Amino acid sequence: MITRKAATLFAVYIVLGVACTYGRVGKEQNHGSLTLESILSELNSHASNFHGLSANVERTKVTVVVDDHSTNTGTILVHGDKMLLQMNPPDARTILKTGGSLYVYTPGLKRVEEYNLGKNRTLVDEFMLLGFGSPGSELRKGYQLTLIGEPTLGDKKSVELQLIPKSPEVKNQFSKILIWFDTTTWLPLQQQFIETGSGDYSIVRYSNVMKNAPIQDSRFKAHWPKDTEKIKPQG
């Protein structure tokens, strides 16, 4: 069962971290020779040699009831189970996931929040790195999968998968998730998370993606300015 802390971490990830817009160019295509089974096989194959990546991120959060769109940009580094997400001003934030801890640093407030993932570590790892080297077998285990189509995003050919969470706890947070995979690298070009109830959603665009980029472990150290207030939210 997902605890209040895990639900908070999911919210942190969506609000601060992923979701971006990627304009669709070109028409939806027929599935052609690709099937759900062949796509999952490709994901299984590519997962074995995925170690990390670096990329630019463009994030858009959409509040449906007032038709509000807010967008900001940043960068993401992934290495194994470590992740560093840095969002630019005016809403500058840093999210660092390393080991069993997740940090949210807000420079404007001179504050860092530290979350001990504890028993939620595996679940949060799976969720926060969704699509980044995820084997097709793991996606099938956690989600009901549907092949939506093969749209072209920008100049990239992709396959679009719909993921319906099997876990009731995860489904309480998100009714469904969409992922567009680049058919060359089999890494996400875009993700969309639709929130349960409100219908609000986040969409994330990844560009300048470098698979298995050389990234020093020092990039994932929890170093903050000396005057930073450190807090550990409970619950």
Image (cartoon, rainbow, N blue to C red):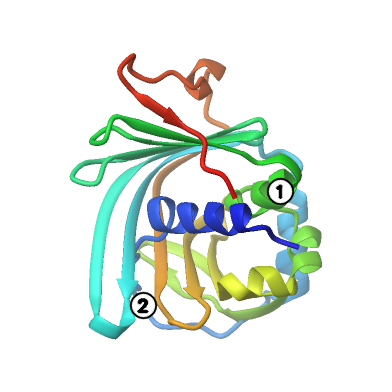
Q: Circle 1 sits in a helix, a strand or a loop, which is it?
A: helix
Q: How many marks?
A: 2
Q: Which mark is residue 120?
A: 1
Within 10 Å of the Cα at label 1, are there few (<14), some (14-19), or many (20+) other Cα atoms? some
Q: Which residue is mark 2?
A: 26
Q: Is residue 142 shown above or below 16?
A: below
The residue mark sitting in front, 2 or 1, is 1
Q: Is residue 50 shown above or below 163?
A: above
Q: Residue at x 49, y 74 (%)?
A: 195
Name the side, left or right, on which 50 lies relative to 230.
Answer: right
Q: Amino acid at mark 2?
A: Gly
Front-lying residue, 87 or 226: 226
Measuring from the top left, give residue 22's x and y in whole percent: 35, 65
Camera sees residue 131: no
Asked if the residue at tag 1 contacts the one at tag 2, i.e. Cβ–Cβ closer than 8 Å, the answer is: no
Measuring from the top left, give residue 94's x and y in whole percent: 38, 36
Q: Earlier in the sequence, mark 2 or mark 1?
A: 2
Front-lying residue, 108 or 51: 108
Measuring from the top left, give residue 141's x and y in whole percent: 81, 66
Camera sees residue 224: yes
Q: Residue at x 56, y 85 (%)?
A: 30
Q: Amino acid at mark 1?
A: Asn
Q: Is residue 166 shown above or below 141?
A: below
Within 10 Å of the Cα at label 2, are there few (<14), some (14-19), or many (20+) other Cα atoms? few
Q: Which mark is residue 22?
A: none
Front-lying residue, 228 or 144: 228
Measuring from the top left, give residue 224's x and y in whole percent: 38, 20
- Alpha carbons under labels 2 and 1: distance apart: 40 Å
Outermost residue on the left side: it is 90
